[in-house]
Image (cartoon, rainbow, N blue to C red):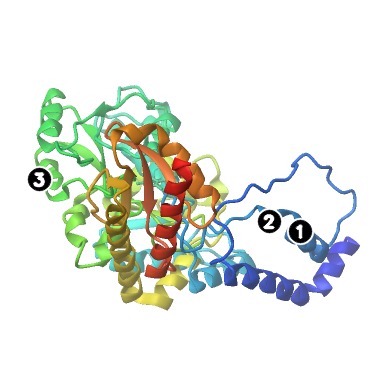
Amino acid sequence: MNSILQNDLNDFENILEKTKQHGIDFLNNLDTIPTSNKNTIDPAGNLNEFGLGSLAALAEFNERLAPLMVSSPGPRYLGFVTGGSTPASIVGDWLASVYDQNTQAVKAQGGASALIEFETINFLLQLLELPDTFSGGFVTGATMSNFTCLGVARQWFGKQFGKDFAKNGISESISILTATPHSSSIKCLSMLGIGSQNYTSIKTIEGNREAIDLFDLEENIKKLNGKPFILISSAGTVNTADFDDFEAIAALRRKYNFWWHIDAAFGGFAAVSDKFNHLVEGWEGADSITIDCHKWLNVPYESAFYLMKKEHLSLQIETFQNSNAPYLGNPLENFNYLNVLPENSRRLRALPAWFALRAYGKDGFKDIVENSTSLALHFANALIETGSFELLAPIRLNNVCFTLKGNHNQEKVNEFLTILNDKGKVFMTPTFYQNKKGIRASFVNWRTTEEDIAIIMEEMKTSILDLEI
Ligand SMILES: *Cc1c(COP(=O)(O)O)cnc(C)c1O
């Protein structure tokens, strides 16, 4: 064994102890670590000939790399849709590295960690009050979940014409209908060879909505003259957290032949609260659903899962099987995750979610969701009270989409956001909505409290003053 590795092996416990201490220092200071910084490194350095050993690497990390980090798991990072990591989820994430299992087969000789994934999906279905007519698996993020679901949808589409696209390539033009797809779904159309421009935009409901207009949807379905299609619908759009009407889509599903996909990356968590579960009523009728765990489940990146109706398992295997590797077994006889999703080797990715679900239960996640949503409302009200801001959309769930009040201030929106973000106390992201430059604040972090809103409002007010100087 290389001598540096041998030293590390001998000193393993001490190394982990120091790493733990470093982690605790970061977590204990999340409140005061800035949400943005301008620190940088020159990434073009040379690789050392001889190893430094873990402790020296850790010292270098502390000195050079740690200063690049921002408080994105902290309570005031409201950009994109950014969750944090709960204690239990970090335990699961650490142990996933420690145990370092390759999570593939259920009946595996070398360990059946896929069973842990089954159990976690089972718990998640219960959390979201979805039936066990779905199976599921873990991927890196909602983008890959959309990819998995739409990949199987593509195979389903071919089957309607007696064709096997997975084997022979796409030989029919695939009809996709959607109103407000997330950019990642469009990226998936590109990755899947369908083409990022090859979809039909359905109107949204009139009057400041991002949800699909059902009349226009049905008009467009009729234009297809009975041809099958894929519908990409939304449970929680990123700008305004709007939801398509799933009961109505379920009714259309009984009339027409289509694959129904729901992107519920963060909005799916509406299901855990009786205050919001009406938003997802009827979603159990979908063929496939995308949900992120590194958003509202507050587990570390990279964690998301797909849900797929069990009746589609053979289509799923056709899409993702390793068909020319006989040593991996017959995909129909022995369930193996590597035959139903994009990756082959995978870490024990379900473990952080398993820990989080066990540690906090249904009630814990209901509290997180209701805390986030009430803080979003509280923040929106505080914004209006200042007289300097206006909402671009009503608060439906956890996202606040707003702008500077008055059309004459439109050119100042980006400058305002830069001033605000540069202060490092809060982070938000820009958007463009209803032909206006706007700002989004998304509440999903379990740590955020009313005190944070007070801090944020102070920053907003001083940034307005700075802007006018
Ligand atoms: C965040 C998000 C995605 C993409 O998720 P990643 O985890 O970044 O891959 C897709 N759809 C919606 C609605 C999202 O909010």
In the image, residue 358 lies at what x, y percent?
A: 41, 76
Query: Mark 1 and 2 residues: CB-CB less than 8 Å, in contact?
Result: yes
Q: Quadrant of residue 365?
A: bottom left
157 to 144, vertically: above or below? above
Give the Cα separation between the discs numbered 2 and 3.
53 Å
338 to 161, vertically: above or below? below
Does ligand 1 reach within 8 Å of label 2's beta carbon?
A: no
In the image, 37: left or right of 323? right
In the image, residue 421 lies at what x, y percent?
A: 50, 49
Give the Cα separation between the discs numbered 1 and 3.
59 Å
* Residue at left offset 81%, top offset 70%: 9
In the image, residue 182 lies at what x, y percent?
A: 35, 40
Mark 2 or mark 3, which is nearer to you?
2
141 to 454, vertically: above or below? above
Q: Nearer the viewer, residue 103 or 184?
A: 184
* Residue at left offset 51%, top offset 56%: 301
In the image, 102: left or right of 218? right
User: Three-letter amino acid code at disc 2?
Assistant: Pro
Q: Which residue is mark 1?
A: 63
User: Three-letter amino acid code at disc 3?
Assistant: Ala
In the image, 356: left or right of 29? left
User: Does the rendering let one see residue 30?
Assistant: yes
Q: Residues within 10 Å of mark 1 (few under 14, many from 20)?
A: few
Q: Nearer the viewer, residue 79 or 121?
A: 79
Q: Nearer the viewer, residue 383 or 111?
A: 383
Q: Which residue is mark 2?
A: 67
Give the Cα separation between the discs numbered 1 and 2.
7 Å
* Residue at left offset 31%, top offset 29%: 163
User: Three-letter amino acid code at disc 1?
Assistant: Glu
